[in-house]
Image (cartoon, rainbow, N blue to C red):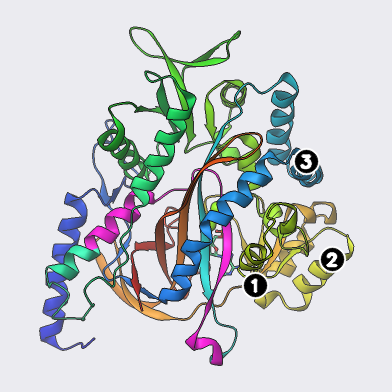
Amino acid sequence: MTTSTESMKDLDTLVDSFLDYALSHGLTVRPGSFENPRKTFGEHAPITLFPSKFPATAFEEACQIQELYNELYAAISRDEDWLGSVMNELAKVDTFVGRLWKLHKEVKDEGITQPLSLGLFRSDYILHVSSPSELQSPVIKQVEFNTVAASFAGLATKVAEAHAYFQRSGSYEPIVSIPASSIAENHALDGLATGLAKAHQAYGVSDAKILFVVQHDERNIFDQRWLEYRLFEKFSDFCLGKSTDHRETSVSMEEKTRKLLLEASPTLQEISVVYLRAGYGPDDYSTEQDWQTRALLERSHAIKCPSIATQLAGTKKVQQVLAKEGIVERFIKSRTAVKRLCDTFAGLYPLDDSFSGIRGRELAFACPEFHVLKPQREGGGNNVYRRSIPEFLQRLPQAQWSAYILMELISAPVSENTLLRNGVPVHMAVIDEIGIYGAVLWNTQETVWNSGCCGYLVRTKSTDSQEGGVAAGYGCLSSLQRV
Ligand code: ADP
Ligand code: MG
Ligand code: MG
């Protein structure tokens, strides 16, 4: 990339056309604060001007193992004993997890009428380079596995289309050469819509609807809307969706059949699948009414995406326990499959006072600069990094340490990109985090349908930022250029 006056002009032209493309193709989010009560305006999402280079073999491996990850988390979700052993301990130190687990047990004791569960998952990875000699063949290490409200399938699909359009139209040519077909196609939107449609079909009532439960004042609303629209485009002959604000959801249940009913004029509407884009953190339960709504959804005959068990299977604590020797084998029988999964694990340590916990506690103080401390929360902005860890722990009563896990920091190779935020392009040193989507439907015994990998996400962030979340304001959406 050159920086002459001529090329600065080329860059300006590209940025202008790119922003026009973004706004006209719904690559948008709602502004941080808005006064218009109809909330009708949007701004471009934080995006990269160029696709992000990523080794083809590492990407291929991440895609291929998604089928195994889908299987693994479906199996964890239905293993009441194992999940219970982890959650009963966690519940003592994390009141939010505790309340969700208690609700799960109450519903279970009452008797679950719906054997099917849907997972729309996203497994996140960063390339790991532990030494200069590994620069040639970096490996993927898993950051986390998302089982609830895994977002950005809509905008990630759109940003891949945007980059492909600028590549094919020759618009990148004056600045950078990107080989034809090197940008990986992204079918995340189709993939998740297909998952919802499969679950709806399995529910077996064609005029029932899929309920999207969305956060009040969601900034990332267009990403969620894209999924609703894609569901309509592809499957409207047999399946429709309906969005509702999580604080205003008016649902009821027919006690005998446990059919979930949405108040819809002129009649009550039966719900086949509940897709949660809300309810993953304590802020979404500010009133008892919010808890009652969640309880009603969980008790109902509708297929949950996710159920409480599946949501809790996605906690960082579960990720840490899985990384202990011999645990994945409980869920996955093939030894080669187990190895492929375990090869993606970074170092993960408990902070309780069990034997291995002592090691976690030691590491947190002996070499905090190589670690990140994570609570059982989602949505970005919750972690404690590097040298802040010892001080943070010292201020926290020791009895609460086990609400956190310690994780080895994954050290990504650095590249460059131009990030676009609020219309301003900034060229900088960046690192990339990829996410692989997967959809899976299972019953109490086995997997009924597994999509394998059904799309991807790339988030690119400045090397100065520890966090990568787009919604939390740290990262930019990108696409993947195979190298
Ligand atoms: P959340 O569920 O809130 O998204 P994450 O575990 O994904 O929590 O952490 C948020 C961000 O922090 C990630 O997107 C990533 O950029 C960074 N991060 C988390 N864990 C690691 C790690 N082990 N190494 C490097 N960066 C990490
Ligand atoms: Mg998460
Ligand atoms: Mg994350």
Three-letter code for the amino acid on which mark 1 is drawn: Arg
- The answer to which quarter of the image holds residue 100 is top right
Relative to 16, residue 110 above or below? above
Horizontal side of 296 relative to 241 (left or right) equals right
Sequence order check, earlier mark of 3 and 2: 3
Image quarter where ligand 1 lies:
bottom right
Span highlighted in magenta in the image: 133-162
- The answer to which quarter of the image holds residue 115 is top right
The answer for how far apart the CA atoms under marks 1 and 3 are is 31 Å
Report the front residue among 17 and 397: 17
Q: Within 10 angstroms of label 2, few (less than 14), some, or many (20 or more) residues?
A: some
Q: Residue 53 carries which label?
A: none
Horizontal side of 449 relative to 418 (left or right) equals right
Sequence order check, earlier mark of 1 and 3: 3
Residue bearing mark 2 = 356
Sequence order check, earlier mark of 1 and 2: 2
Three-letter code for the amino acid on which mark 3 is drawn: Gly
Horizontal side of 80 relative to 409 (left or right) equals right
Q: Is mark 1 on a helix, strand or loop?
A: loop
Residue bearing mark 3 = 84
Q: Is residue 137 magenta?
A: yes
Q: Is mark 3 on a helix, strand or loop?
A: helix
Q: Residue at x 13, y 63 (%)?
A: 17
Q: What element carries label 2?
A: helix
Residue 248 shows in this picture? no
Which mark is in front, 1 or 2? 2
Report the front residue among 91 and 340: 340
Q: Name the image quarter holding the N terminus.
A: bottom left
Q: Does the magenta stretch include residue 157?
A: yes
Horizontal side of 107 relative to 412 (left or right) equals right
Residue bearing mark 1 = 386
Q: Which residue is drawn at 52% across and 65% down?
A: 125
